Image (spheres, rainbow, N blue to C red):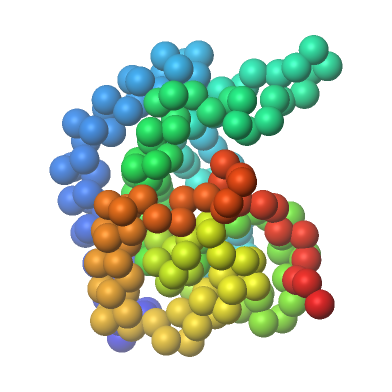
Amino acid sequence: MYKFFLKRIIDFALALIGLLLLSPLFIMVTIGLYFANQGKPFFFQLRPGLNGVIFKIIKFKTMNDRKDSLGKLLPDSERLTEIGVFVRKTSLDEIPQLLNVLIGDMSLIGPRPLLPEYLKLYNEFQSRRHEVKPGITGWAQVNGRNAISWEKKFEYDVWYVDNLSFLIDLKILLLTVKKVYAREGISQEGLMTTEAFTRTKK
């Protein structure tokens, strides 16, 4: 009942309320990033959703498009703007994804949507993360976020798929508020975000 009906209703209602309440902050961050990123405050990227179906995710753009003399993008650490660092540390870059939730591509709670090129790298167990809609936050995020290994992330994702319930979602939501406030697990040690997934280590 909850998984197939109530969860979507709650997602839509909370996403709408969230956008309304956060609209002043949304507008201020948009304006700040507009000037920091040469008129590009938003970042769009294709991601796999429920059953691996590709959708376009929207986030605040925290890095500019500066390139080297050969036309290649500079490293992430050199492209992160000052306001971008702040937006990431406070997780404000996730706010636009509330639009994805309203549309129905995402849920508030679920495995984080990763890159399409990872699909061919998953084993059968890891692919089960796509049995539910991806979320803005999830079980892996409140248990380490970017500071844990890919293998552990996938374990948490599949655990969520098998244990999805209203109480679990409520727990994740409350823990997310705590994590955001404490700014925990935003990046891996020595990296600005997290290393790319290549394949499960044996």
Q: Is 22 positioned to the left or the right of 65 in the image? A: left
Q: Is residue 169 above or below residue 114?
A: below
Residue in the picture at 53% in, 28% down: 80
Inspect this view and state whether residue 102 appears: no
Residue 88 sits in quarter: top left
Q: Is 151 positioned to the left or the right of 29 in the image? A: right
Pick the residue in front: 152 or 16: 152
Q: Is 24 positioned to the left or the right of 106 in the image? A: left
Q: Is residue 190 above or below residue 6?
A: above
Disc tally is 0
| Residue 158: % across, % down | 54, 80
Residue in the picture at 72% in, 81% down: 124
Inspect this view and state whether residue 155 appears: yes
| Residue 191: % across, % down | 61, 45
Residue in the picture at 48% in, 61% down: 145
Q: Is residue 77 above or below residue 50?
A: above
Pick the residue in front: 105 or 112: 112
Q: Quadrant of the N terminus?
A: bottom left
| Residue 73: % across, % down | 71, 25
| Residue 62: % across, % down | 48, 31
Q: Quadrant of the C terminus?
A: bottom right
